[in-house]
Amino acid sequence: MTRRPLIPLAAAASVLVALLLPAVPAQAAQAAVATGACDPVQTTPVLRPDVPTATEVLGFPLGERDVTTAESDAYLQAVDAASPRVAGGTLATSVRGRPLRYAVVGRPGNVNPGGLARISTAAAALRDPRTPPAVARRLAATTPAILWIAGNVHGNEESGTDAALRVLYELAAREDCAADRILDNAIVVLLPTQNPDGREADARRNAYGFDLNRDWFARTQPETDGKLQLLRRLPPVLFVDAHEMGRESFFFPPNADPIYHEITDESVSWINDLYGGALIAEFTRQGIPFFNRDVYDLFYMGYGDTVPSTGFIAAGMTFEKANGDPAPRRVYEQYLTQWVSLSAATARKHELLTAWHAAYVEAYEQGRAGALEPNEIVNPGNELVTQVPDRPVRHYFLRTDDPAKAEEVQALVRRLQRMDVQVNRLVRPLRVPDYTPYHRSARSTVLPVGTYWIPMAQAQKHWVQAMLNEDTYTPFPYFYDVTGWSNPLLFNVAGGYSGAVLRPLAVRARPVPAPAAPRPPAGAPTVGVFQLGTGSSAIESSGWLRWLLERKWALPYREVTAADIAAGGLSDVDVLLVPNGSAAAGAQALGATGSAALAAWVRAGGRYVGWRAGTELAALLGISSAVLAEPTSDVPGSLFRVSVAPGPLARGVGREAWAFYEYDWVMRSPDPAAVAVSFPPAGSEDFAVSGFERGAEADLGGTAAVLDERVGSGRSVVFSVEPNFRAFTDGTQEILRNAILGPAGGAAVATAATSARAAAAARGLSDLRRPVRLSVTPADAAAAAAVLDRAGLAYERRTGAGSVRFAVVNRGELDADQLPWLDTVVRGLRAAGVTPLALSAL
Ligand SMILES: [Zn+2]
């Protein structure tokens, strides 16, 4: 993009004349739908014979059993080849090299290259608040809506794929009024599987252990990144993300609280009323069991529902079908929800696109006024616990005056630009009277030339707030996932915001190119990775680490097993990385021989770098002074400011960082010199949290986040937190990198006495893996216990100051979607009148 001064908004619309070209007409079916004459489900299909059925291509009908990835691809390609209504493509290649195939289905004139280009341009104009009203009205009338159906983001949740293939067939083959309504008013992007590697491995996650339904804003994985690029080209007003769950029946929205505040009223109304209402009516008519308003929230900004809703002002929806039901049932119900959703959208297409454009105009106006959307509670009986502060935010700024952070700032700007955020650079110094650095007080500041300026007065205002927020202002203390994700804090870059009316002199920032391929660091040590068990915590943390080593750092490593260690296999390893997992599983696998060998290797000069369970293992093995304790606070995944002591771990990091803390052990050392990174003392102005917390300051203030100690001739560096959470904590990744590649640390020594004390504390820790945590007031404790007892659940109970905490045993380390009893507990608590202080299922 050329550098040019910013121009007034009103003057920028001349190119839009080109958009007044006629689109493929579609009026007849619309009239019928408006009168309800064509029932989307009960209309008898009229089929063209020239579109191949699944039986003809695969030898069996869809729904008889789950298709393989190859079968899905083969069928999609066969329908594509046979039908002018279908335009197939590949939007990404998975980690293991499999194509992510999609099909755009619509009238032939809409899905040929010219038609798709025209619709893409028209959709961009509808998303542009500068588009003149008359042009927007015309486009809303003449442009097909873009509707997305995506399945199988969790690889072992198959039925959404097979259902999407049935929708593909019906849209390609049907000639009746129900299909006509969809074809005349929309193009439908079908992405049968979002996770082909996971599907083939019958695994939830992708080949690097990432939950792809948590990766949407960071886009670390190719499967996610390619999807977002196509979404930008064909932006949705509807995005269906079809899952399966470990619970009975079927879930579709309305969602549970909390809902992220920048998701517009339009999106929530479409989700709850237009689609939720249509689905309730059809499931009720057919007598199919379903539930809603419980379990599945709309908060964490990395899901396949929140990101389409916030980043595209779509109706992003998660559907969940019981995975224990037979394939025909699962595929039929998924198909039904997809078909009903497409029908509901297209019955009101003109109204939808009109409101879609109006929502972008409103976003711009909100941004100009500096108005954040307020928190709202959607479900009866729930009460708001946090409101969004009533102060204007008109501008965000990212500073560029720290050369050590240049790469991080560039990466963040690129991330914003690749969600169509307008990012500018100051060409003159700018005095900002109320510049507010993240989690500091406002002060008048002159920002230098080159500072990135992101105005809220833009189409992507909601997304800007979602990414650059100081806090998420969690409105309700139920947590299906983490609660803090402010991107400047994740990257640990300097920035802030202002509510003032400013007139910056700035130019549009050039698109930041993709970073160059990493080169292996010179003189790198020999690195080993020891995975602690095979549970989901181990799969994730080890997988995130492998991605970091291979894709971001190009740092060679090799896997080391417990048997290798016991057999002396560490002799050629310089640095051993021990990520999260199960310390008990690791210790058991090592046995007495392996444990002694590992400790001896460290004392003889090895460098042990562990985090979370890896830290617990170090304590158990007597190679660290880390005294670990159970947290008493509730922190379901939030960012905490930490102080970084000068020394080798601080290189390129600075004096502060933001640590991603999630119910981790509270860590202390008797040796202050061992503490390399710490939570600021309680009561100090440095103590700051982005995301939900309850009781954190008293619990964590002044404790350690990283210890760095000599152990004999070797060294241990241990983190209480995950330094590479979902591989998007770029800021603390740098501390980890220093721990691996940097010079040896300071003078602190883990002695026999301090190590023995640490080991004793570690042996006393709870060994629950990924429990569900419920905190209630003492007055509610008996009722809460009764709910858990009735559900037949085992739990540990602890009484703290003003609260009682239940840590509910999660056998098999199941993910939240797979917990068979979560809906029972949620409903039981509500029926018992228990209002949790915090309920975390992540
Ligand atoms: Zn799922």
Image (cartoon, rainbow, N blue to C red):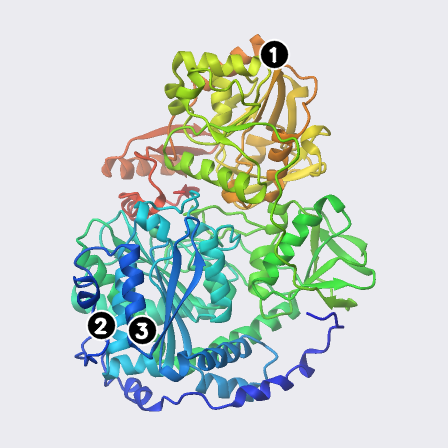
Q: Is residue 262 above or below residue 114?
A: above
**Marks 1 & 3, CB-CB < 8 Å contact:** no
Pointer 3: residues within 10 angstroms few (<14), some, or many (20+)?
A: some
Residue 376 left/right relative to 380? right
Pointer 2: residues within 10 angstroms few (<14), some, or many (20+)?
A: many
Residue that carries the numbered disc 3 in the rendered image: 81
Give percent across and percent down for residue 611: 52, 30
Q: Distance between the residues labelled 3 and 2?
A: 10 Å
Pointer 1: residues within 10 angstroms few (<14), some, or many (20+)?
A: some
Q: Looking at the picture, which amino acid does disc 3 mark?
A: Ala
Circle 1 SS class: loop
Give percent across and percent down for residue 776: 40, 38
Mark closer to the observer (2, 1): 2
Give percent across and percent down for residue 516: 63, 51
Circle 2 SS class: loop
Q: Looking at the picture, which amino acid does disc 1 mark?
A: Gly
Circle 3 SS class: helix
Mark toward the start of the polypeptide (1 vs 3) = 3
Q: Distance between the residues labelled 1 and 3?
A: 68 Å
Which residue: 24% across, 77% down? 173
Residue that carries the numbered disc 2 in the rendered image: 52
Q: In this view, does 172 lie above or below 689?
A: below
Residue 435 left/right relative to 523? right
Residue that carries the numbered disc 1 in the rendered image: 712
Q: Is residue 304 above or below residue 369?
A: above
**Marks 3 & 2, CB-CB < 8 Å contact:** no
